[in-house]
Amino acid sequence: MAALKGSEIAEHNDAKSCWVIVHGKAYDVTEFLPEHPGGQKIILKYAGKDCTEEFEPIHPPDTLDKFLDKSKHLGPVDMGTVEQEVKEEDPEEAERLERVAQKPLLSQCYNLHDFEAVARRTMKKTAWGYYSSAADDEITMRENHSAYHRIWFRPRVLVDVENVDISTTMLGSKSSVPFYVTATALGKLGDPEGEVVLTRAAHKHGVIQMIPTLASCSFDEICDARKGEQVQWLQLYVNKDRKITQRIVQYAEERGCKALFITVDAPQLGRREKDMRSKFTDPGTNVQEGQETDNSQGAARAISSFIDPSLSWKDIPWFQSITKMPIIIKGVQRVEDVIKAVEAGCQGVVLSNHGGRQLEFARSGIEILAETMPVLRELGLENKIEIYIDGGVRRATDVLKAICLGAKGVGIGRPFLYAMSAYGQPGVERAMQLLKDEMEMNMRLLGCNKIEELNSSLLDTRALFTHSSTPPDHLFGSAYESLATPAQRPK
Ligand code: FMN
């Protein structure tokens, strides 16, 4: 087949006939426009043009093969004939590149906060917007971390702590540490290689990785990046079309995933205004001319319209009938639902509010954990289910507090994304090493040799349930005009 010329493709530049180029190949997406989960407008922006750069981070490489009929695959394009868009000089981007060139050395990062600070300065605005954003006033996101500050330690002394072992078992698999890489979508926004960077770093450190449904890499690419006995779990957003869901789950099991985490806290995606605003001001979009773009919804909403809001407890037996993998409910937020999960025969729950990205004023995972464990113990259910938590974990002391309270493991999301975005695989490896070092040291200082020795007697949780130090509402504060005191009378 002769390669298509750029001029031929450029003729198909509207909704009546819409062709686009992705990775040097042309596609007729005219009929697909109304079905595109991210809306038509973003495709029409690239009608007749090359959209690879925009397409790449948001779509796994097998997307077009899977979702666009073969008759619409028009074949290779002679890219030399495609008119290159002259990009206007973008002073913001030039400044960003300068900051990238001057970023601190990796060895200057001593904790997970440092990676966040570097990522904030060096990531593209849209990518930073997607990763860092959370729901509404982002109070739950900040509470997730602050809640750990309301727990203090009661260490033991004069214990022989020469040898400390921080390894553990999660859902029947060995792990070198009691934390795991939780599922986070769109890895290629942070690194051109995407989630496989996390896979490789996780392998180096014996850390378990949860693969997101909405990864930028294809599922196969992430599985193929696995080495030896490395353990991966699957995070699942349940599709309205259960046949698709069944295919995903069974394929994951076939490819060796060791557990199925069903995300249940996102029947609709939360409003993440940083994400939405960063799209809105993207110079590539047309909002200044008053045109609405679906893009202004942010990356999150664009990719998530397939999620089934009708999912309920009644569906759990169906999942149990299609897989032998342990089933873990991700996004549980009250003890009553933990008990339901036990009754439904689930092997685990993740106490999580999705990193504060969903229901604003959802409580932190650590607080729910402290509410849950005593109830489970009272009912004799504590060994019937494994309890995981995530959200706001930034220090090994946070991990230790969760394990002391009865969590089997702790998920970490943004910190690994930031480490990857700022420094690639070496960044993620250093982040994991720093956490390991912090953990070993703090186990010693707590007077514990093994994970099994961590228990709630090592904690003072009296302040945990009081919310007197709720994170401030900055937007409200900055818009608020303070009341005035009486003015002096003129002379
Ligand atoms: N949770 C999911 O179940 N599926 C996802 O696709 C998903 N994508 C996420 C993308 C980003 C950028 C972030 C920050 C979180 C995402 N989460 C997702 C939630 C995480 O799994 C986890 O609950 C959260 O990040 C934990 O909070 P932390 O970021 O403070 O560690």
Image (tube, helix red, strand yellow):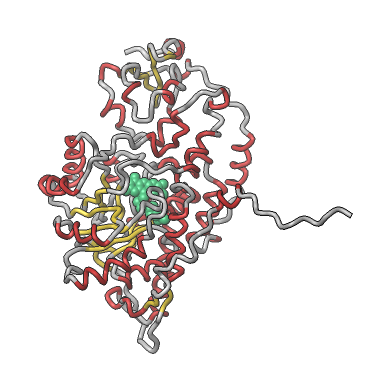
The residue sitting at 54% across, 22% down in the picture is 85
Q: Residue 348's quadrant in the figure?
A: bottom left
Direction from residue 379 to residue 29 in the image, left or right: right
Residue 307 in view, yes or no: yes
Q: Residue 47's quadrant in the figure?
A: top left
On the image, the x and y values in percent for residue 468 come to 48, 66
Q: Residue 376's quadrant in the figure?
A: bottom left
Direction from residue 299 to residue 240 in the image, left or right: left
* The residue positioned farthest toward the right in the image shown: 491
The residue sitting at 18% across, 42% down in the picture is 251
Number of disc labels? 0
On the image, the x and y values in percent for residue 189 come to 44, 41
* The residue positioned farthest toward the left in the image shown: 321
Closer-to-camera residue (255/113): 113
Direction from residue 105 to residue 155 in the image, left or right: left
On the image, the x and y values in percent for residue 451 come to 30, 73
The quarter in which the N terminus is drawn is: top left
When the figure is inspected, residue 215 is found, relative to residue 65, above or below; the finding is below
The quarter in which the C terminus is drawn is: bottom right
Closer-to-camera residue (288/186): 288
Direction from residue 200 to residue 96 in the image, left or right: right
On the image, the x and y values in percent for residue 117 come to 54, 54
When the figure is inspected, residue 163 is found, relative to residue 238, above or below; the finding is below
The residue sitting at 54% across, 33% down in the picture is 282
Closer-to-camera residue (79/318): 318
Residue 200 in view, yes or no: no
